Image: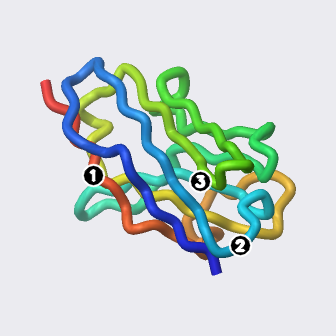
Amino acid sequence: QVQLVESGGGLVQAGGSLRLSCAASGRTFSNYNMGWFRQVPGKERDLVAANSRTGLSRYYADAVKGRFTISRDNAKNTVYLQMNSLKAEDTAVYYCAAASGSSGYYLQAQSYAYWGQGTQVTVSS
């Protein structure tokens, strides 16, 4: 019911920055909780950051706290992930996801019904 398309990934040196964007279409964007996940081959898909429908409630994984910022612009149907001070261990495919039914945010991948195709982030040093 909601289509999600990520963009903004690429190759960056350690210490650099990237901003990922996730554009949504199909339904009213403000109805959905949003999350960013990342995954490397052979590993589980892990939550990086999440926010509520209004964007006022936010969650960050300990590994990215203080370096990444999740934000959303409901007027533009877009959620962002600003990634600063990137490290080699941040290398992964990053996925945008949407969920409905909560006034807060969800922490588990299975709680999200809609997913983008992912965008590769590679950090070199």
Left or right: where 18 falls relative to 4: left
Between disc 3 and disc 2, the foreground one is 2
What is the x, y in percent for residue 75? 73, 49
What is the x, y in percent for residue 33? 72, 58
Residue 16 image-quadrant placement? top left
Q: Is residue 47 above or below residue 2?
A: above
Q: Is residue 30 above or below residue 63?
A: below
Which residue is depicted at the point 65% across and 49% down? 76
- As helix, strand or loop, the secondary structure at mark 2 comes to loop
First in sequence: mark 1 vs mark 3: 3
Q: Which residue is mark 2?
A: 27
Q: Is residue 122 above or below residue 99?
A: above
Q: Quadrant of the N terminus?
A: bottom right
What is the x, y in percent for residue 111? 65, 69
Left or right: where 27 falls relative to 36: right
121 vs 46, nearest the viewer: 121
Q: Is residue 25 above or below residue 54?
A: below
Which three-letter amino acid code belongs to the residue tagged 3?
Gly
Q: Which residue is mark 1?
A: 120
Mark 2 packing: few (<14 Cα in 10 Å), some, or many (20+)? Answer: few
Which three-letter amino acid code belongs to the residue tagged 1?
Gln
Disc 1 and disc 3: Cα gap in Å?
16 Å
Q: Which residue is mark 3?
A: 35
Residue lying at the far left of the rendered structure: 125
41 vs 51, nearest the viewer: 51
- As helix, strand or loop, the secondary structure at mark 3 comes to strand
Which three-letter amino acid code belongs to the residue tagged 2?
Arg
Question: Is there a contact, CB below 8 Å, between mark 3 and mark 2?
Answer: no
Left or right: where 52 falls relative to 22: right
